[in-house]
Image: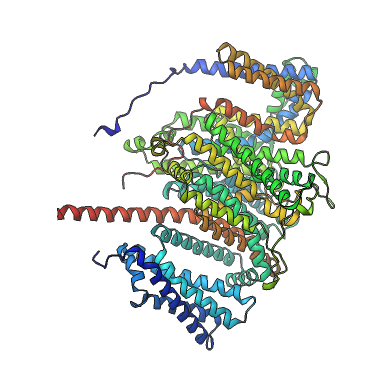
Amino acid sequence: MSQEMTVAVPDTAPPRPRAHRRWRVLSLVLAAFAALSAVRLFSGQDALTAAGTVQTMLAYAVPIGLAALGGLWAERAGIINIGLEGMMVFGTWFGAFAAWSTGNPWAGLAAGILGGMAGGLIHAVATVTFGVDHIVSGVAINILSVGAMRYLSVLYFMDAPGGGAGQSPPLPNFPRVGLPLVETVLGPVHQTGWFLVSDLAGVVIGLTTGMSAITLIALLLLPASYWILWHTRFGLRLRSCGENPDAAESLGVGVYRHKYAALLVSGGLAGMGGVFLAMVASSVYQEGQTGGRGYIGLAAMIFGNWRPGGLAMGAGLFGFTDALQVRGQGPAVHALLLLMAVALLAVAVWQWRRRRIGPAIASLAVAVLLGAWYALTDTVPGQVVIASPYIATLLVLALASQRLRPPAAIGRQWRRKSG
Amino acid sequence: MTGTPPAPGGTRPPVIALAAAASGAAAAIAAVLLDLFLLAPAALALGALAGHALGHLPLAGGRALAARTAEPPLIRGAAAVLAPVLGVAAGLLTAVVADLWLIEPAAYGIGAAAGGAATPLIHRTLGRMLALAISAVAVAVLLSLLVTALVLVVTGVDPLFAFTAMLDHGTKPDSIVTIANNGSTLYLSAVAVAIGFKMKLFNIGVDGQYRLAALLAAAVGGAVTLPPVLHQAVIITVAVAVGGMWAGLAGYLKVARGVSEVISTIMLNSIATGITAYLLTTDRLAVEIGTNNIGTPEIAESGWVPGFPMGFMGARVDLFGLVLLAAAVGAGYWWMLNRSRFGFDLRATGQAPEAARASGVDVKRMVLITMIISGMVAGLVGMPQLLGDSHYYALDFPVGLGFTGIAIALLGRNHPVGIALAALFWSFLDQSAQILDFEGIPKEMAVVTQATVVLTVVVVYEVVHRWGRRYEQQQVGRELGRAEVAS
């Protein structure tokens, strides 16, 4: 009879106090920034921390971050959303269509978000109501989005002036916002080239001037999502659906309702990322414009351990390498090799002190290889630069995936027990 | 269930064969007679149905149906509807192909015979799950055609006109050969995905695997010159090895480091894109090919796989020789799943990993091997195109086949035959839609149909599956209740 006896496994390590963890993350970020600054000084690659690079980084990081945020909402409710890519495609097309036909960028934003939400709704109907496998449904949505949008483009954009089968006519822009005076005050400081000070000035300038309004909204959505998911009753219930839907149901939480809500928000965020791509990062809709950013967003979220702060860091990393590739070209990324070699050296020392000889030697070997690569070449081929964020993600996942903690009931095809 | 118990298995096949032959002959006669008054296809359909009816007569096919009476009415109903429909479809297909080099009455007579013979066979052999699966797919296809028709109406096109134009163009000899050619490529891709799916492994990375494999295989094939059979063998071996290695990387990361294969294969796709872009430059593996195109040096003729000339049915296009490879892979997939220890472990691990582990299956090893095999098949995806047509890997080599493969594997329910039909259906839509552009209708309409059919098929299949399971549970419950009362 006692077939269902289970043995409770105690947590191997008691969780550290939150404040401690926060300080550790903060000091790590600071150390990384200092190292970046040092590499900038040593290699003379000013593009590494230039204000322009920071702005470009934001432009690349925002759509990825929005997709990642969409992934966070869905996965916290227990639903894997690989259809983010398709929802972004919906966002790009509907955003472009509405903005073009009304001439108002905000109408485009609204339509793009609604388009993404429609994608989220399809995913919700398939996975929540009909219990279809989450990945299967997501893949189907991605296929659907490409086909449907191509059809609509041929229908509506083909005969429009400046449009084509895979392209919309030029679209209106969002207004730009920024703090006055910052550039005039900090500009000269940024030019000095001092260690840390100049770099910090560059980052501050980049973050406070000439920002598209939608970028600001996107940046604000990050703390907003954190607050809703972790500090409201709705958020607690939503996360409980992703951790233990049975328990949530027994406490009277409408699990289906919360999953639907999560997927609608998820789709809306992805759609907004699509609008950003069509109307801020570019000024026309183009077929294939998303270029897999929905997938990258998902990766950034996993990279960030299903946490808002972490996913922002992940999106920032992707955005940073993309920005360097655009602004600094090969030599700037070449300088990063040195940074990576130093970082891996630090990892090797740390592993050695923890008596983990194997990983230490492996890290050391890779560090030496990277160092040699840096010393023996002047630049990195463009194609390697393009692939670098993906390689970085893969490496991070390979090294840290044991420390990741996804929501417990993620991907489960959960059926409600009551009626 | 008070019907006659099923006859012992040994005596059935000859009876069925007899029934099939008799009904086929009857169908053919009926079709030829009716052809005098009616359109040929209609005559064929009626003929096949006549054959089907004959199959029901007690003297010939009665025993064929006996086994069905043991099944729940739901399944019996589905089988009774599906058998004639599938039979007529098979007959029409045969007739269309035969029509290409025979006169019409003869072709349709043959078609009717085939259809008439097929119905009792299908009716008898259609398994329970298969009947449900086919109904689900049929419903999904109908739904998606409806959605497409709706989209067409909304955008101001007559759907009937569009569908007729597509059907006309899609059944031209050249189109049929092209459909088979592209279908074989799609089939390989879908089988690669399906191998993973069977174990709940999502190999999203087939796309990167086949592109990398095709590039390196083309480079090796272009660099060496070997005697005929050996040359192709080397190229294919390189492709298989590269594909397997690239997918194995994802498998290793999952097994050793716990990285989800969904994410790692997506990353590996992008990395593969970077690597191919890096290698495919004139400094490295590529040479100039025509204007604005670079590719690997052309493979010497000893490395080509000649196509089958299809002039006898009026086609100017050759059928890829490697269509046979696709068929062999399909047969191998079927054998592996249903006849090998490995396939059993694979399915067991996919359906209940804990139970599989408890019965001694090394799940980690299975994950790694399955990923590698999936990648090896993925490596073959580019081969029909490379060895049968282009003979080099250039910038215009087809991309995105891996993602289409996922869709087709879903549509074909990971079944070797189902995937084949799905691949042909997909390829048919692609090819037949080409005509629409000439009629002023966007040919992307086919993509809408393809996408909708995938989405509806997953939903409908899930619903039908759940429905069937509940029905079965009720049956079992009823039987158990009865057994208790009896004892």
Image quadrant where one finds the N terminus of chain A: top left
Residue A242 picture location, percent across and down: 43, 36
Residue B50 picture location, percent across and down: 43, 79
Out of A304 and A87, give the one closest to the viewer.
A304
Residue B82, visible in the rendered structure: no
Q: Name the residue furthest bottom.
A: B36
Q: Is residue B261 above or below residue B128?
A: above
Out of B428 and B373, give the one closest to the viewer.
B373
Residue ID at (59%, 19%)? A359
Question: On the picture, is A10 further left or further right than B162?
Answer: left
Q: Is residue A10 above or below residue B423?
A: above
Q: Quadrant of residue B389?
A: bottom right
Question: On the picture, is A285 further left or further right than B464?
Answer: right
Residue B234 picture location, percent across and down: 70, 46
Residue A399, visible in the rendered structure: yes
Q: Quadrant of residue A173?
A: top right
